[in-house]
């Protein structure tokens, strides 16, 4: 192995009205040929900025303010813009996160490949086409000579990422920067794509700079790893060593926050390092007077016995794509005879790949979709489904939801106080405005936020804080069942750990029944008492969570577990 | 796709029926047709006879059926003002308006799209800012003021271009064109420019906004990272992806330009449909107004259909759905 990319003392600065922001400072790293170099860190740590600096595509007004960037003896900082552009694709290439958006939707795969090949090699159309077909075959696309004529939207997500990789390697680059290449993919596809990357590194001797926030991915493919935080290098070394025996306390806390697939922990360790960024006022610590007030109020609401929710034989069909003028379109079956039970005061985990029907089930339970068949019941009482559930049916309050994306689930033009007071007012839980405000402040403290922030707007909070607000909003309706649809998949690991801790605490304290939907098996293991595995709208396996993780019975579940990358070798 | 087009065609039929009904109501209920056709000296008995002959005593639905049926067969009735068949009057005027509209459209696209791309790629350049400012003035000032200013400058002060009429025209069958003579072109330039300025500004600003958004997209970043030449990046990848929304607006605007070129036609005394409509309003020539209404509706419906078809041409996601 020889050194391909040498970065020394790299600094990147973003000037702004409020002074200069140092996105990276004094970063050193080396990538060898044929090596996969992992870059981890939380969002905002500067991982992607390193990639952008190397390929010369820093978004304006950012610029490289210090240090050296050397690609195989060539000083990248000394290149003119034209030279730098010629280098892109030719020697350095890039793979982006989302294969849905990184291909031009209006051009066929063939046109995009040929165009890229001809930008760097003097080949005629036929020769370029032959090469393009070879590349697609190499990246694992069967029947490439026919499928090359297709448009990107005709490929599935995983296949699209293969096309993206084919585009990235079609000019024989020496270095590829892969920016979260598998984050948007399901586990099974993720593992195939990672295998492909590993294979390319070995066979073609390509150096990879693999940027990801997923430590499991790093553990699976990276040879060496660099941990970043706030634009500074924290630790680097061979993957095994950094992940198993981290020497820096930040890496240790980061590792502690990663949900483990191999065992269930009572709570996540509270990463000390992040507490200064996002204070985790846990319930274990002495709650303030206000927090206690919210607690009492919530307890008074849920002091009855806990509730259980059953869904029996739920079937949901959506109208299919019309193929002919005269025939009715074939309906698409999203859920087929799905039965689940969320036991009282327990957490039911629902897992499955994208398209398995997880979110559709959530919508059925909350009464947003009317199923074609099946029944729902809460504590043995049948619930009307879909629109037949009237707007003021009590179950609209009893079943509350926390959504995936805390950025879009809070109205950006309302103050936090108004957002949180809404359920109180709407369900007539508290008619006095002053008391409502007190209760909202108390609940803010309960979920670990400062009561003084009540008059702020959602954009003034971080993602994790917003998810806490979303949880507080659900709690203020005094729900019997809390439905969380991928509540942490938009969050960084340490923030995820805090939010999961909060949910666990609330569940233990108030005896809430929680339905927890996630594609991340490790997260579900940490949360769930019972588990349901969905695939293509059908239940593959259901039962006790711990039993499932130790002895999965269905073949599909075993596969899913085997494919989930784990940061911890068992 | 076939299903989509069939659905659109069916919708268009309903739109046309609705407009025809409005035109019919105009004819039937705005004033009494008989009293407008006859003078004071016509006896009441004669008036009643005329009323029966025209079928004005028949049930309303039957009258509407007859009205629509006549429209479909190209029987548009006679003008109150000139006593000529309305169909013939319209056919004589259509070429002038279409030519004016098309030339205005071409000008606006030829200037608007490149200007939009330029201002999107170099948003801070002096020229971009100047362009944006000038065109803003262009839309803020009413069309007739622009027309009058152009006439004053090029027609009166410099004396380069004629200020009214179509100039020299040639007959290609029933189509009277001014596009084949130098004189015709000279007469066309000013009105087309006046009519096109608004659309030009709109096109430019729309292309600019869409283009700026597209240039931020992942596939452009990926294509940049692959080292594709900037020219291809901007036009092949960038511009083509901005076209869908741009075509929608341009299509609708073009309908508006042709339908409501009334002001421009009246400023330049351009013998098109707009001027005809204006004259008809002055003389309460209801048959002409009714047909004009139906015709313009048809025009909009056809343009919308073309726009829908263009979507499919541009965007393969609408054309090919099957996975491979």
Image (tube, coloured by chain):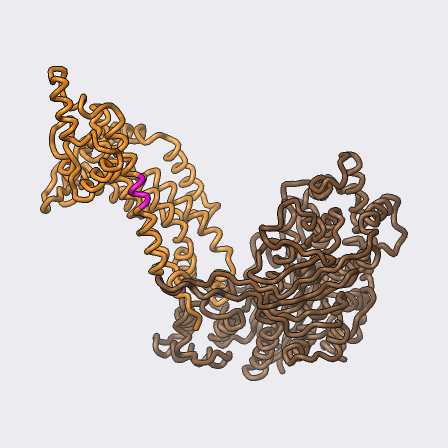
Chain colours: A brown, B orange
Location of residue A241 (image quadrant): bottom right
- Please name whichever residue, A447 or A62, is drawn nearer the observer in this view of the structure: A447
Q: Would you place residue A487 above or below residue A7 in this image?
A: above
Residue A145 in view in this figure: yes
Q: Would you place residue A279 above or below residue B289 in this image?
A: below
Which residue sits at x=70%, y=52%?
A400
Name the spot of residue A281 as percent of width and height, x first.
83, 53
Q: On the rendered image, what quadrant is the C terminus of chain B found in?
A: bottom left
Position of residue B98 in the picture relative to residue A496 (left or right) = left
Residue A26 in view in this figure: no
Name the spot of residue A322 as percent of width and height, x first.
41, 62
Name the spot of residue A29 as percent of width and height, x first.
67, 70
- Please name whichever residue, A169 or A440, is drawn nearer the observer in this view of the structure: A440
Q: On the rendered image, what quadrant is the N terminus of chain B found in?
A: bottom left
Magenta region, mostly helix, strand or loop?
Answer: helix
- Please name whichever residue, A548 or A522, is drawn nearer the observer in this view of the structure: A548
Location of residue B295 (image quadrant): top left
- Please name whichever residue, A126 or B310, is drawn nearer the observer in this view of the structure: B310
Which residue sits at x=76%, y=62%?
A497
Q: Point out the residue furthest to the top here.
A: B41
Position of residue B252 in the picture relative to residue A435 (left or right) = left
Q: Is residue A304 magenta?
A: no
Name the spot of residue B115 as percent of width and height, x first.
38, 47
Q: Which residues are magenta?
A: B14-18
């Amino acid at each position: 192995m020889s050194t391909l990319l040498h970065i020394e003392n790299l600094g990147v600065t973003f000037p702004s009205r409020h002074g200069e922001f140092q996105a990276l400072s004094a970063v050193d790293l080396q990538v060898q040929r044929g090596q996969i170099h992992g870059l981890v860190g939380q969002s905002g740590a500067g991982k992607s900025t390193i990639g952008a600096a190397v390929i010369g595509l820093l978004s304006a007004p950012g610029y490289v303010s210090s240090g050296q960037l050397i690609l195989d003896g060539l000083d990248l900082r000394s290149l003119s813009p034209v030279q730098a552009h010629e280098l892109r694709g030719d020697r350095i290439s890039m793979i982006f996160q989302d294969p849905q958006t990184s291909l031009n939707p209006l051009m066929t795969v063939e046109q995009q490949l040929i165009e890229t090949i001809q930008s760097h090699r003097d080949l005629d159309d036929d020769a370029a086409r032959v090469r393009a077909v070879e590349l697609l075959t190499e990246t694992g696309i069967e029947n490439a000579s026919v499928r090359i004529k297709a448009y990107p939207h005709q490929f599935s997500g995983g296949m699209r990422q293969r096309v993206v990789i084919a585009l990235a390697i079609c000019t024989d680059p020496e270095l590829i920067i892969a920016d979260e290449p598998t984050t948007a993919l399901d586990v099974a596809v993720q593992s195939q794509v990672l295998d492909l990357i590993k294979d390319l590194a070995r066979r073609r001797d390509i150096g990879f700079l693999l940027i990801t926030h997923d430590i499991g991915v790093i553990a699976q493919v990276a040879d060496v790893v660099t941990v970043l935080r706030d634009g500074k290098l924290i630790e680097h070394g061979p993957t095994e060593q950094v992940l198993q025996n981290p020497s820096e306390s930040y890496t240790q806390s980061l590792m502690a926050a990663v949900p483990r697939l191999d065992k269930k922990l009572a709570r996540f360790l509270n990463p000390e390092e992040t507490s200064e960024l996002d204070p985790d006022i846990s319930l274990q610590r002495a709650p303030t007077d206000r927090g206690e007030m919210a607690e009492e109020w919530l307890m008074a609401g849920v002091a009855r016995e806990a509730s259980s929710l059953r869904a029996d034989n739920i079937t949901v069909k959506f109208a299919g794509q019309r193929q002919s003028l005269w025939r009715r379109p074939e309906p698409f079956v999203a859920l087929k005879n799905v039965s689940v039970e969320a036991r009282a005061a327990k957490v039911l985990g629902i897992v499955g790949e994208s398209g398995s029907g997880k979110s559709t089930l959530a919508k059925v339970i909350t009464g947003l979709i009317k199923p074609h068949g099946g029944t729902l019941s809460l504590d043995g009482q049948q619930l009307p489904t879909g629109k037949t559930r009237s707007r003021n049916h009590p179950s609209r309050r009893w079943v509350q939801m926390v959504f995936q994306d805390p950025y879009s689930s809070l109205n950006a033009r309302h103050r936090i106080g108004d957002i949180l007071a809404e359920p109180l007012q709407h369900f007539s839980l508290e008619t006095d405005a002053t008391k409502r405000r007190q209760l909202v402040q108390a609940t803010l403290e309960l979920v670990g936020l400062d009561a003084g922030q009540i008059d702020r707007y959602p954009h003034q909070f971080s993602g994790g804080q917003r998810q806490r607000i979303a949880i507080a909003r659900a709690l203020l309706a005094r729900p019997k069942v809390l439905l969380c649809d991928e509540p942490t998949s938009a969050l960084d690991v340490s923030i995820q750990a805090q939010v999961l801790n909060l949910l666990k605490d609330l569940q233990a304290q108030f005896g809430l029944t929680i339905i927890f939907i996630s594609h991340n098996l490790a997260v579900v293991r940490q949360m769930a008492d019972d588990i349901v595995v969905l695939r293509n709208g059908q239940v593959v396996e259901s039962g006790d969570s711990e039993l499932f993780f130790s002895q999965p019975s269905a073949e599909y579940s075993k596969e899913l577990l085997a494919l989930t990358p784990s940061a911890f070798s068992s | 796709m076939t299903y989509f087009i069939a659905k659109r065609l069916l919708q268009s039929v309903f739109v046309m029926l609705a407009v025809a009904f409005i035109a019919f109501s105009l004819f039937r209920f705005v004033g009494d047709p008989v009293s407008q056709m006859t003078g004071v000296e016509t006896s009441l008995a004669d008036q009643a006879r005329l009323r029966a002959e025209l079928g004005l005593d028949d049930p309303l639905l039957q009258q509407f059926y007859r009205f629509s049926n006549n429209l479909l067969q190209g029987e548009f009735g006679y003008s109150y003002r000139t006593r000529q068949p309305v169909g013939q009057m319209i056919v004589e005027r259509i070429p002038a308006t279409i030519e004016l509209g098309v030339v205005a459209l071409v000008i606006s696209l030829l200037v608007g799209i490149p200007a939009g791309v330029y201002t999107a790629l170099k948003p801070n350049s002096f020229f971009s800012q100047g362009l944006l400012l000038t065109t803003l003035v262009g839309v803020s000032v009413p069309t007739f003021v622009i027309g009058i200013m152009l006439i004053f400058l090029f027609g009166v002060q410099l004396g380069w271009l004629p200020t009214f009429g179509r100039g020299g025209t040639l007959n290609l069958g029933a189509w009277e064109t001014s596009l084949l003579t130098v004189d015709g072109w000279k007469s066309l330039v000013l009105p087309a420019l006046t009519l096109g300025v608004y659309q030009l500004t709109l096109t430019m600003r729309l292309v600019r906004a869409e283009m700026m958004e597209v240039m931020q997209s992942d596939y452009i970043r990926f294509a940049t990272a692959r080292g594709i030449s900037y020219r291809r990046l901007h036009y092949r990848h960038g511009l083509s992806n901005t076209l869908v929304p741009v075509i929608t607006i341009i299509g609708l605007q073009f309908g508006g330009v042709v339908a409501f070129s009334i002001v421009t036609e009246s400023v330049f005394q351009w013998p098109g449909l707009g001027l005809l409509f204006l004259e008809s309003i002055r003389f309460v020539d209801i048959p002409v107004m009714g047909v004009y209404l139906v015709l313009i509706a048809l025009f909009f419906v056809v343009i919308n259909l073309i726009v829908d078809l263009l979507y499919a041409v541009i965007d393969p996601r609408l054309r090919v759905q099957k996975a491979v």
